[in-house]
Image (cartoon, rainbow, N blue to C red):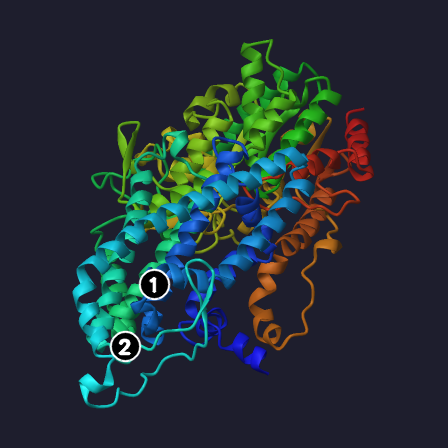
Amino acid sequence: MKLLRGFWFSLPIQLFLLHFKKYQVFLLFWYFLFATIAGNFMSSYGAVSLFLAPEYLGKVSFFSIAFVGAAIGIFIMSWNVTTFILHTKLISFLATTAQPFLKYCINNALIPLGFLIFYLVKGIRYEHYEEYNSVGGIVILVLGFITGFTFSIGIAFVYFFSADRTIYRKMSGVIAIANKRYDKKILGKPLPKRRAEIEVDWFFSAMFQIRKPRDVRHYSQDFLNSIFKRHHLAAVFAIMLAFISLITISFFLDTPAFIIPAAASITLLLAILVAASGAFSSLLKRWSIPLLIVAVAGFNYLYQNEFFDPRNKVYGLNYHSKIPRSLYNAATIKALASDSNIQVDKQVFLQRLNHWKQQQGEEKPILFIMNVSGGGTRSATFTMNTLQRIDSVLQGSLMKKTFLINGASGGMLGAAYYRELYLQKLKDKTLNPNDKKYVDAISKDLLNPVFSSFVARDILGPAQQFEYEKMHYVKDRGYAFERQLNINTQGILDKKLKDYIDVESKGITPTILYNSVITRDGRKMIIGSQPVRFLMRPVADTNRFYDYEPDAIDFNSYFKNQGSANTRILSALRMNATFPYVLPNVWLPTEPVIDVMDAGLRDNYGQETSLRFIETFKDWLLQNTGGVVLIQIRDRAVTDWDNAAPESNSVLSFFTKPFMLLQNNLFNIQDYYQHDALEYSYKSYGSNFKRVCFQYIPGDEGLTAGLSFHLTTAEKNSIAASLDNAVNQTAMQDLLKALK
């Protein structure tokens, strides 16, 4: 019992319990880190890979993991500093010891030590099984982490040792006077009762020796407070340095060397949030919540009155206030989709179809329409692999036979890249679009620069601007995404919509339509090199039905006054792939203002637009082609039983299930609707209409690539191998049969 009591009333155990008794909010930061590394938080979006396979300068290395180690060291010190400030009244005996903060850190090490062991074990397993790293490579990464962690912890303790010496040099006289009070005979009266503190029988010294706490009843409370206050000021100064460092980095993120791993940026942000939360709680106390409400209300007022404008914009589009904004109302949208406007755009595309037919050199060629699904870098990589495989089988004729490409999110990144490579090949015969290096390029990381920018620019740093086409825009994570995508694809996608008018109109390359969804009402925003107002509403039989309300808007004609033709292709791709929160919603110059986000929210597979296109030009297609083949490239199986959301029998699920219904089944619901629409198209168009579906289906190893802008080596291999499964081999045979 004596041994058990000694263990229970040791300072390490009492501090551990104290965190659960008071200020539990700080444990949420630890929960976030533990859950992320365990793969229980946003694992399907690649969060775990940011921490266990961090990239710096495009690769996982000694230096990349060292940055993460240093950031974790700073977070641990921030947590120690903050809790030290909040708990000092409960452990006042430390004030009279040398290096009180060092002793606090040593005795407060249970949670940090447990996390470090957990991180290293998970990291080693991840590098071995997911990144296929060698033993030697893993050892180098472990040494990198230890080096970075030791460096940041060492710098912190050197700083606090210096602060301790300064404090005790200034306070030595007061300490000597206080020690004299310990003699009860001199005082002539008994010492006051012990103040309310946690009960501690022993603690670790700076040399890891067991010591009993000193009786501090002979010290005045003012003296103890003055000792701790000086340590608090030193601690706050250290956190301010971390804050200033992040802001400084934000000014140099266009230089690759300053784009630190996203995990390091996120961890540094957590360190600052811990410190800010502690300061808020300790300084304002019961006024914290009222003042927080006032601050939010003030921030909202400044935002609504446009004292600052953090909203993301389309690069190339003119947002100048002197240009009248298009009204976003029922009358304007209906006028845009008038019969006369639809006929004008149809005539333009009929000419495109005729030019495409001339390029084929056949009386009735087979016309391909390509649909690619959303799914981040997973879908971009699978799309690129699939297009290369199909083109190789068709001996380089895939893009020539394809008239239209559309879809959502990541798949569009791969499709747009491949189309541009094909266009480059027409100019340079030595270029091979089916080279594996282009798959490697589109599968490169996009997540690190996005999160680094999110932390350093969007949250902490002051707004910075850049110039594009003589217009100014704010640098944010949307800008970082486009910049990194441009680097990964060797700059060949850095074009404008108008740059593709000629090659699309002549049928030299497929026409691409970039989609996004208007958050205000769910309408689709369709972006093309030329207006496509015939896609704004379904083809109606006016003898039997009233005209339908337009459920889509043609970007090109709607924003003609804002220079829609100058829209950057990289921006159109980003609008198409604006995954919630990962990338910022893109706002558009309308009255009232609207914003758009990921096309997958409305049609993750691109089929809805394609079927409407086929219905619109059905007569021409029947007369001039030998058939239409709808090639769908999707990042998930058509029948996806294995990835269905598991049923939960918890009480919490009883309340959350109605809210999670749409999120868990969004893509299934789209599939059900689109299968129904596809059947109607079969009946309407006839036997010459076929769909061939290539699907990313993970192999027997059970590894499924995450829905993220980052892929591990194992995930890349899984995606490439998926093309060899029986389902996709059958799809390839079906495609070849359709050409006969």
- The quarter of the displayed image where residue 286 is located: bottom left
- The answer to which of 530 and 651 lies nearer the viewer is 651
Residue depicted at 25% across the width and 42% down the height: 324
Q: Position of residue 665 (x, y in %)?
A: 63, 58
Please tell me whether mark 1 sits on a helix, a strand or a loop: helix
Q: Residues within 10 Å of mark 2 (few under 14, many from 20)?
A: few
Looking at the image, residue 295 lies above or below residue 406: below
**At which x and y percent is residue 389?**
71, 26
Q: Which mark is drawn over residue 100?
A: 1
User: Label 2 sits on what residue type?
Assistant: Arg
Separation of marks 2 and 1 at Cα, in angstroms: 28 Å
Residue 450: where, in percent of width, then height?
A: 44, 41
Residue 31, position as x, y percentages in the image: 51, 62
The residue that label 2 is drawn on is 286
Classify residue 218 as left or right of residue 93: left
Q: Residue furthest bottom?
A: 189
* Amino acid under disc 1: Pro
Q: Residues within 10 Å of mark 1 (few under 14, many from 20)?
A: many
Q: Is residue 658 above or below residue 133?
A: below
Q: Quadrant of the N terminus?
A: bottom right
Residue 260 circle label: none
Q: Is residue 331 shown above or below 190?
A: above
Pointer 2 with pointer 1, Cβ within 8 A: no
Viewer-side residue, 607 vs 536: 607
Residue at 55% x, 59% y: name it: 114
Q: Residue at x 42, y 68 (%)?
A: 25
Residue at image coords 48%, 70%: 16
